[in-house]
Amino acid sequence: KSLIENFCPNGGDHISVKGRSLHVYGYLKNFLFPKEFLDKPVSTLSGGEKNRLSLAKLFTGEFDCLILDEPTNDLDIATINILEEYLLSFEGAILIVSHDRYFVDKITNKLWAYENGSISQLVMEYSEYLEYEEEMKQINAIESEISANDESLAEPAKKKTAKLSYKQQQILDKHPEKIEAIEARIAELNHALSDPKIYQEIGLQALFEELEDKKGELGILEKEYYEVLEFEQNLNS
């Protein structure tokens, strides 16, 4: 069947979405489908296009709760942005299992964390929880070392004599500015991907690739910066 036959099996060209009657094209263009795709058989679509079509079909339904298992797997950046937009406007409960920390941070407001055979309910961002988890591991490691050898209690005094290397100091001084610049560019790219006038002129693929590169750069810079920042805080503690 074609796209329009999937959405209007009984004929016509309008569908109901959240109580509103919309033209199929008016709805599908939100999922990056041009008008000429309406009569195209679904079987001829690419994998990414089929994923976008599945999401479009999903959000025509009315549900109280969505249960999503790794929903960002195999989705390109544009489709993830569309998914996020629709989930943020969803007026029900959403239960998500995902390893995508950025997606979880953006969508959720409560975590169910499995810890030592029990479940903890936490009201914090996933990234925040991961940092907390890492801190607890470090604290447990330090406590184990101290209990194993009382002489290790003198170690903090030795740490105070250490200092940042030249490279570490450069990271502290320069990385915040670099991070800010990349975040600004990511915001520009996300805006471009949501504006047909811009992405049709520049090209979706080019925008996707640059966005992926920038997110990769941002992740590396943030990791380096926070590692050095934590190291500096330990020196001064």
Image (cartoon, rainbow, N blue to C red):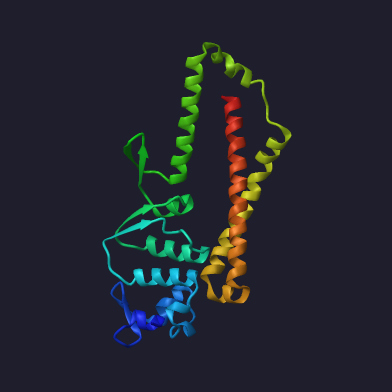
Q: Is residue 176 left or right of residue 120?
A: right
Q: Nearer the viewer, residue 159 or 120?
A: 120
Q: Name the residue: 31% across, 88% down.
A: 11
- Quadrant for residue 51, please give it: bottom left
Q: Is residue 143 left or right of residue 110?
A: right
For the question of whether residue 120 can be seen, the reply is yes
- When the figure is inspected, residue 42 is found, relative to residue 178, above or below; the finding is below
- When the figure is inspected, residue 124 is found, relative to residue 11, above or below; the finding is above
Residue 52 point in image, percent of width and height: 44, 70
Q: Name the residue: 61% across, 76% down.
A: 201
Residue 236 point in image, percent of width and height: 59, 25
Residue 217 point in image, percent of width and height: 62, 52
For the question of whether residue 22 can be seen, the reply is no
Q: Is residue 7 left or right of residue 169?
A: left
Q: Quadrant of the N terminus?
A: bottom left
Q: Name the residue: 36% across, 83% down.
A: 5
Q: Nearer the viewer, residue 141 or 163?
A: 141
Residue 4 point in image, percent of width and height: 38, 83
Residue at the far right in the pictured view: 166
Q: Quadrant of the C terminus?
A: top right
Residue at the far front in the pictured view: 43
Q: Name the residue: 34% across, 62% down.
A: 90
- Quadrant for residue 3, please give it: bottom left
